[in-house]
Each structure stands twice: as structure tokens, then as C-alpha cells.
Amino acid sequence: MRHINKMLQEQEEKEEIDMTPMLDVVFILLIFFIVTASFVKEAGIDVNRPEAATAVKKDRANILVAISDKGDVWINKRKVDIRSVQANIERLKAENPQGTVVIQADQKATTDILIKVMDSARAAGVFDVSIATQEA
């Protein structure tokens, strides 16, 4: 009888499922999805963009600058002074040398602020500057 119990116990030990390879695969998939995920960047505020019939979607917009209806400039979810826009864009361009600037200006924003932001971007060395609009 002891011999039969011992054989059954040995057989049960052999039938255990090893979960380690499955956990390894799950963690590798998790790392893969985190690395390949594209995260949505936001400038910091919602603006009412003007409509344009010739609007074209830009695939890679790395540096987003928002201008509110009151003339406030936002970069990376924080309000910045118009005089420090160039330094902020230079810093972001150093992080991503192929970065492009997209300006999200509110409909009621003045062109004076828009032109100053565009000049700051070009002075920072970014010549691919776009203005965000809505499709008509």
C-alpha cells in the first residue's frame, strides 16, 4: 500500500504545470506594447482652431505650442512667457532633432502672438512650422 501511495505522489509531482515560461512571454509582450505605443502629446489647453478647406493631417508633430484666446502660450502643459518660447523649443529640439513645430492657435488669438511664436521656432532652428486647423 505504501508503494502505491508513493507512486501516486510521484506521479502528481510530475503533472504540475510550470508557469514560468508563460509569465516570461506575458512580460515580454507587455514590454513590447509599452515600447511601441505612441503616446498622444498635448500642448496643455484646448483651443478653438479655425477651419480650413485645404487642411492636411500631419503625421509627426513632436513639438506642440498652443496659443489661447487671451494670448497665453502653452508648451508641454505649462504656461510659458513669449520671451522663453525660443528656449523651450530649442530644448525640445535637442531631445528630438527631427522634431517639427505645430502651433495650435485659438480663433480669437492675435496674429501678433502667432508671428512671435513662429519667429521663435525659426530662431530655435526649426523651419518646419505648421498651424493646426480643423477641416471645414
Image (cartoon, rainbow, N blue to C red):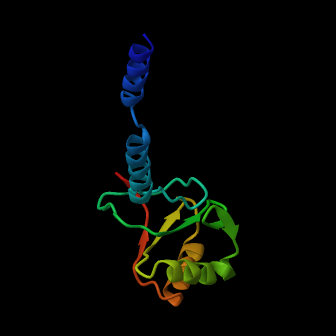
Instruction: Say left or right for 78 vs 59.
Output: right
Res 38 seen here = yes
* Residue 118 visible here: no
Residue sitting farthest toward the top: 1
Residue 89 placement (x, y as % from top left): 56, 79
> For residue 60, which quarter of the picture?
bottom left
**36 over 94 or under it: above or below:** above
Q: Quadrant of residue 17?
A: top left
Q: Position of residue 34 (x, y in %)?
A: 45, 54
**Residue 50: percent from left, percent from top:** 45, 57
Give the residue displayed 52% in from the left and 78% down from the top: 95
Q: Residue at x 53, y 84 (%)?
A: 119
Which residue is at 46% across, 84% downward?
Answer: 126
Image quadrant containing the N terminus? top left
Identify the residue at image location x=47%, y=56%. Answer: 39
Q: Would residue 135 appear left or right of 111 to someone viewing this image?
A: left
Q: Is residue 20 above or below residue 126?
A: above
Q: Is residue 91 above or below residue 26?
A: below
Q: Position of residue 82 (x, y in %)?
A: 66, 77
